[in-house]
Amino acid sequence: MIQVVREVFPQLNDQLNQLPHPRRQDMCRYSGGHIWRAITGTYLFRPGSRNAFDEKRNAGQAPWNLGDLCGQPGDDPRFAGEPTVTCSDNAALHAGRVDPDEARQIPLWMIRQLLKRRLFERSRLFDRWYVVLVDGSVQEKCRAGFEQDGKASSGEARYRYVLQVVLLGPEGTVFPLMHESVDMHNPVADKEDCELNAFLRLSERLKKEFPRLPFCWVGDALYACQPVVERCQEYDWKYVLTLKEGRQPTTWDELIKLLPLSRGNALRTCIGPGGQDGRLDYRWVEDLLLGQGKTNAILAGEITAQAATLYAFITNFSQLTPGRVIEITRIGRERHRIEDTFNAEKNHGIGLEHVFCAETTASKNYYTMMQVAQILWILVCHGFLKRVYQWARRATEQGLARAVWEGLRARRFPPDLPPFGQLRFGCP
C-alpha cells in the first residue's frame, strides 16, 4: 500500500497541506496532511466508525508508519520523540473549518493524475468516450436534532443525500470523480426533484473542470428526461440511459409502435458456446420523440435457463450498426457497478449512511475523504494485491483492508522501499 501511494500520488501530502484552514501551523502539533490522512484512514482501513479507529490509532507502530505516510515522521520535533495520531474529535473539528468546495478538489486532482497515466484509455467507449456512471444515495441517516446548514433540526429524523459520479476504469473498476450534496427531509418524497437539480449543478462543475474531455453518461430511468438530454446536447456529451414505460410513456409508446416497421434493426447473439447459456436479442429504433427533441432506443432481451430479462435504453449515439448496438448495451448494463459500490460502502465496513459528523461542513468533508480512500483502495487492492497474490483474490476486500491496518500497527516499514513496478489491472 505504501509503495502504491508513494508512486502514484507523490504530491498528495502537499495537496492536503495546502487546503485553506484558519489554524496557525506553528502552534499546532499535527500538520493538515496528518489530519486529513487520519480521516482517510477511518475509511481506508474499514474500522466502521471513528471510535473504532481511535481505539487502535496509537497502537504498535501505527504512529510511526502513518507519520511517514503523511509526511510528518515520528522524529518531528513537535512529537518530542513520542509520535501519536490525532484523535477523531480533533480531525472532525478541523474538517468543520475547511470549505467543502476546496476539499472536494482533492479527488479531482487524483483523477487528473490517473488520466495523465492513461489509466482509463482501454475503458473508453469506441476508443473515445470516457464512461461516467451517475446515481444518488443516502449519505447519512441522521438522528433527530442534528445540525442542518448551521441550524439544529426539529425532532424529526433527517437525511443527508448525495449525488455521486464515478468514472469507469479497467476491469470493471469505478473511480469516484465528483459528487454533489443534496440535503433533504425525506429522500422518498423529494428524491426525484432534488437529484435532477443536483445533476444540473454537478454537470456544470464537471464541464468547467474538464471542458474538452468527451464523456458518456450512464444512469437509471430517473435521468431519461428532457433536462438531462438537453444538458448532454449542450455540452456535446453522449448518454446511455435506462428507459422505463412509466418514466417516459410517450417515448415508450412510440417505440412499441415503430418496432414492427423496423424489422431490419434486429440482431440475435448467443451466450456461451453454441448458445448453451442462452441468447440475447437486440431491437432498436431511431429518431423517437423525447420532449422537444429526438433520441434513439435500444431493446435487449436476455433469455437464459434461469430468467428472461428485458433491458431498454435511450441514447444519442447515431448510426446504430449491430456492432455499435452491442457495445452501447454493454455500457448501459455497467450501471450496476455504482450500485455495487454503494452497497460495499454501506455494508462492508466503510461506513456510508453512518453519521461520522453531525456538523454539516465536517460531514461533507468526511464524505470527500471517503472518496479519496476509495481511489487509493482500488489502486492498492485491484491494481496490486489481487493481481500479484493469489491469496488476496480469495480474501474479501474488508478482510484485506483490516489486514493492511494490522500490518501498519505490527511492523515499522523501512524507509528505502523499492518501486512497486507498473500499475496494472487484471490477474496474470
Image (tube, grey):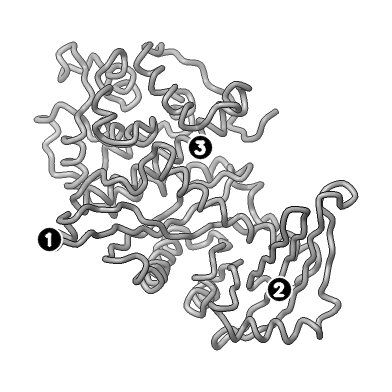
The answer to whether residue 46 is above or below residue 112 is: above
Task: Give the percent coordinates (x, y) of residue 369.
Answer: 34, 42
Mark 2–mark 1 distance (CA, rounded to whole Å)? 50 Å
Q: Amino acid at mark 2?
A: Ser
Q: Identify the image quadrant of the C terminus.
A: top right
Where residue 354 sits: x, y (%)? 31, 45
Q: Residue tagged by mark 3?
A: 378
Earlier residue among tags 3 and 2? 2
Q: Secondary structure at mark 3?
A: helix
Q: Secondary structure at mark 2?
A: loop
Q: Which is closer to the viewer, label 1 or label 3?
A: 1
Image quadrant assignment for residue 155: bottom left
| Number of numbered discs | 3
Graded by Cα atoms within 10 Å as few (under 14), some (14 to 19) or many (20 or more), the crowding at tag 2 reads: few
State left or right for residue 15 relative to residue 286. Answer: left
Residue 191 horizontal/vertical position (percent): 38, 68
Amino acid of disc 1: Lys
Q: Residue at x 36, y 12 (%)?
A: 412
- Which of the 4 image quarters holds residue 13? top left
Mark positioned earlier in the residue sequence (1 or 3): 1
Specify whether 354 is left or right of 119. left
Q: Which residue is mark 2?
A: 318
Q: Residue at x 14, y 59 (%)?
A: 150
Which label sits in the foreground, 2 or 1? 1
Q: Amino acid at mark 3?
A: Ile
Residue annotated with mark 1: 151
* Chain-order first, disc 2 or disc 1: 1
